[in-house]
Amino acid sequence: MTATTQNILSQRVQNLAESETLKMARMARELKALGHDVISLSLGEPDFDTPDHIKDAAYQALKDGYTKYTPVAGLPELTKAISEKFRRDNQLEYRPEQIVVSNGAKQTVYNLCQALLDPGDEVVVLAPYWVSYWEIVKLSGGIPVPVYAGVDRDFKPSPNQVATAITERTKFVLFSSPCNPTGSVFDRDELEAYANAIAPHQHVLIVSDEIYEYINFTHEHVSIGSFPQVKDRTITINGFAKGFAMTGWRLGYMGAPKYIADACSKIQGQVTSGASSFGQKAGAVALMGDLGPTETMREAFRERRDIVLSMLEEIPGIKANHPDGAFYVFPDISAYFGKSDGHTTIHNADDFCDYVMSQAYVGLVSGSAFGDPNCFRLSYAASEEQLREAIRRMKDVLGRLK
């Protein structure tokens, strides 16, 4: 970038980091174009297709003429379905007017930060965290405040850590469960302890990202907003991308106190307006229809997780927790720091991922993007054959480091 072009671009965009997951996906595509057999395990995208009954609903909606603008906050039949889903699955009472449908859960996070944050406001972020939390908070003028726990604690910060991080400038606490990138799932007792720690701080909201809800291997998904001490201060985010393999549909939603829902709708009305009309029609069918394909997908992910963990255990120096949800493992590889193959020395997780990509043609994402420079994220949203081959290659090239 020249000095002239740098002056043209806003300071805002110059301070914004590129998404590491998208960056690694781009690198994988470039290497593939050069003829290399790359296995990309970087993107958080199910390799399953959207279930047929959902696609059929979109097709029918198109034939029925649902090709026009929608209300900014969502089609009434979808906001009603989301309200019913929250009550059915999560014991959450969000009326349809408290729901905003967006072009993906990522836009929901952006809407919230734009609606809630003034320059200098703080957001307590449980770390490791999804890459975009950090950058969206900064882009909105906020200051992200990480609260960290490592692999030995299943990447779960203590309630006391959260409470200690709260100041008079804190606007909300932000986390995901099941968690991206760690796959950790907060159980009922853990979430109640967080609720109890946050409840006395009346000025602090809670933002719970639950987009991996249906990819949960514990048999119980718990929403922190179901606890009475914080239910009126909790915003619950969800979407269709992960549990219904609908990443390209760009459809997410939130339930929130009405004044926050109204503010987010106001933001969205000036940025994108409503999500696609026929996509929303299909979304209502997804929530109220057959969850069998989702359950089948979840079990497939569970089997892949077990394969990946068993193979990673055979590689010296890799230390992983036992993730109970999502489709990621987030191993600690700090034991490799300082090691070399005689040409390349591994100083950190960035070097580790670059080495594995250049030597094994396996795409991973450095943990530094998620707030933990000792780890990397591996997505097992890939075929069993690809996973076995990728980890075999990793074991081979990592064996050269001494």
Image (spheres, rainbow, N blue to C red):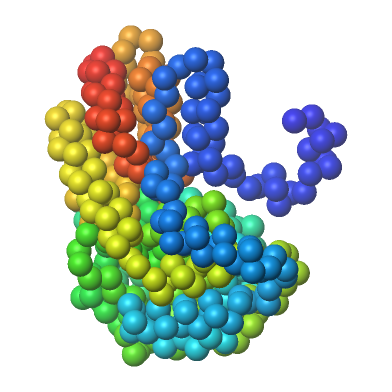
Residue 398 in percent (x, y) is at 27, 21
Q: 63 or 357: nearer the eye?
A: 63
Vertical order, 114 against 294 (above or below): below
Q: 77 or 180: nearer the eye?
A: 77
Residue at (38, 10) in percent of width and height:
343
Vertical order, 380 against 293 (above or below): above
Quadrant including the C terminus: top left
Quadrant including the N terminus: top right
Total marks placed: 0
Vertical order, 249 against 347 (above or below): below
Q: Can residue 11 be seen by looking at this rendering?
A: yes
Q: Is residue 172 left or right of residue 221?
A: right
Residue at (39, 71) in percent of width and height:
289
Residue 362 image-quadrant placement? top left
Residue 266 in percent (x, y) is at 70, 77
- Residue lying at the far top of the rendered structure: 342
Q: Can residue 167 be seen by looking at this rendering?
A: no
Q: Is residue 144 left or right of residue 336?
A: right
Residue at (42, 88) in percent of width and height:
93
Vertical order, 217 against 397 (above or below): below
Residue 365 image-quadrant placement? top left
Residue 133 in percent (x, y) is at 51, 58
Residue 175 in percent (x, y) is at 40, 65
